[in-house]
Every structure is written in structure tokens, then in C-alpha cells.
Image: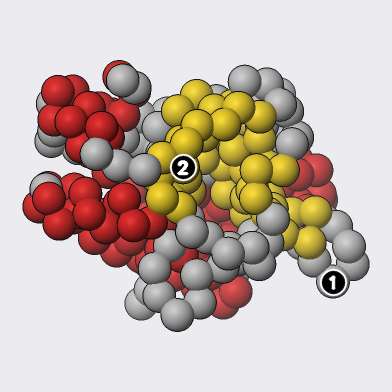
Amino acid sequence: MFPILKDSPLFAGLDQQTIDTLLEHASYTTTTFDTDTYIARRDTAYSGLMIILRGSVRGEVTDAAGHRRTIDNIVAPQLIAPAFLFGGYNRLPIDVVANENGTEILTLHRGGLFEMMQENMIVLSNFIDIISNRANFFSRKIYALSVLMLTEKVAALLLSTSSPATDTVPLDKTRMADELQITRHALEQTLAELAKKRLIELSETQIVILNRSGLESMVAPQ
């Protein structure tokens, strides 16, 4: 039905036939969005798990000064805010916005997902792993952005916006400085320091991570 779901972390370890069979008995909808269209608003009830079938989305918040800040970028076939689907306060903490035309979202209604997890233990195990991994990721990000030194904050940002498979980050000094709430000059000095240590390599358009483990050791809690 949706071949991309075979690569989704929710269905990891399942073949396409099993996924299709699970979906045949589940309640879900699919919706397509244009660039910069709101998919969901902050504080709205989250009654169905959203999975990106095509395109990408970003999570945004508005700070006290009224500036929009991107918290996370998520691409197909990842899940959107799975940790907020269940529990006593199942409301989204962010706005979810489409990054590109044709972004397609599958919404798997909560009851259908619950039945799916009862029917298939792999889906249940995957869902628990996803929530645990996201909680760990955001706890480290919050720690890094709140208590670490400037070089460590920059290292944390580089790690959170890249992956071992794609060790490059677009060099957008304005966006990075804004997200870290520092000046461009301070950012440039910090990037130069990291480059001098051969942790990263700078060009006019991108940052290449040369030593991921070195950056990780900077942001690891002591």
C-alpha cells in the first residue's frame, strides 16, 4: 500500500505484506500539504500518530520576542511527535509545518495503532524504542543548549543537524547564530576554533564533520 513504510522505524523488521495486512485492519487517513502549510498547531489534541510518507516537515515554536524558531526537521518516513500520542496530556508542544510541496502525511488513529501494537509485538517494541530514543535525544539537546560552554553548544547543534550517514551541515550563519542566540562573530570564532582542532572543515557553503566522536565527547555529560 505504502512501500516507504518498510523503511519507517515503526515497522522496522517487518516485510511489506505484513505491513499491508496491519494497515488493512487499521483506521488511518492520508493528507497532502503545500510548502509552509500548517499540518498541526501547538496545543492541539494529538489523537493520531502522523507518519511522513513523502517530503519533510519542521517543528516550530515562537519565542518571547515573537520570532519563529525551528526545533527539528523531520523527513519521510519518520514519525511526528510519537511521545505525545498517549498519556494524560496528549497535545502537541510545537507547530508542525510542511517544508515542501506535496508533503504527504499518514495519520494512524490512536485506537488503530493500539490494536496494531497488540496484534504485532514487533510494532509494540519499535514504538517503545522510538519514544525512548527521542526522549534521550531531546534530553541531551536540552542539556547541551542550556548548560554547556559556547563551543560545546555549537558542537551539539552540529550533531543534532547531521547524522553519521551525512556528515555535512549547510553553512547558514544567520540561522545558526539565531538558534543558539549568539552573535555571528561569536559563531564564526567558535567554528574557526573547531576547524583548527580538525573537528570540522569549513567551506563557503557547508560544514563537514571530520571527527564526530570528538564532537560527541564535548557534549557528553560529565
Which residue of the protein is positioned furthest toward the bottom in this rendering? 88
Looking at the picture, how far across and down is residue 46, in whole percent?
52, 60
Which residue of the protein is positioned furthest toward the right in this rendering? 65
Q: Is residue 16 left or right of residue 190?
A: left
Quarter location, residue 4: top left
The foreground one among 41 and 9 is 41
Name the residue at 36% across, 65% down: 136
The disc labelled 1 sits on which kind of residue? Ala
Q: Which mark is residue 197?
A: none
The disc labelled 2 sits on which kind of residue? Thr
Q: Which mark is residue 107?
A: 2
Looking at the picture, how far across and down is residue 72, in whole percent?
57, 49
Looking at the picture, how far across and down is residue 121, in whole percent?
10, 52
Q: Is residue 39 left or right of residue 200?
A: right
Q: Residues within 10 Å of mark 1 (few under 14, many from 20)?
A: few
Task: Name the image quarter holding the N terminus.
Answer: top left
- Considering the numbered disc 2 on the image, is that residue within a helix, a strand or a loop? strand
Name the residue at 45% across, 28% down: 53
Quarter location, residue 66: bottom right
Name the residue at 79% across, 61% down: 62
Q: Are marks 1 and 2 in contact (CB under 8 Å)?
A: no
Distance of label 1 from label 2 (alpha carbons): 31 Å
Looking at the picture, how far across and down is residue 96, in whole percent?
64, 48
Establish if 149 lies above or below 151.
below
The foreground one among 78 and 31 is 31
- Considering the numbered disc 1 on the image, is that residue within a helix, a strand or a loop? loop
| Residue under label 1 | 64
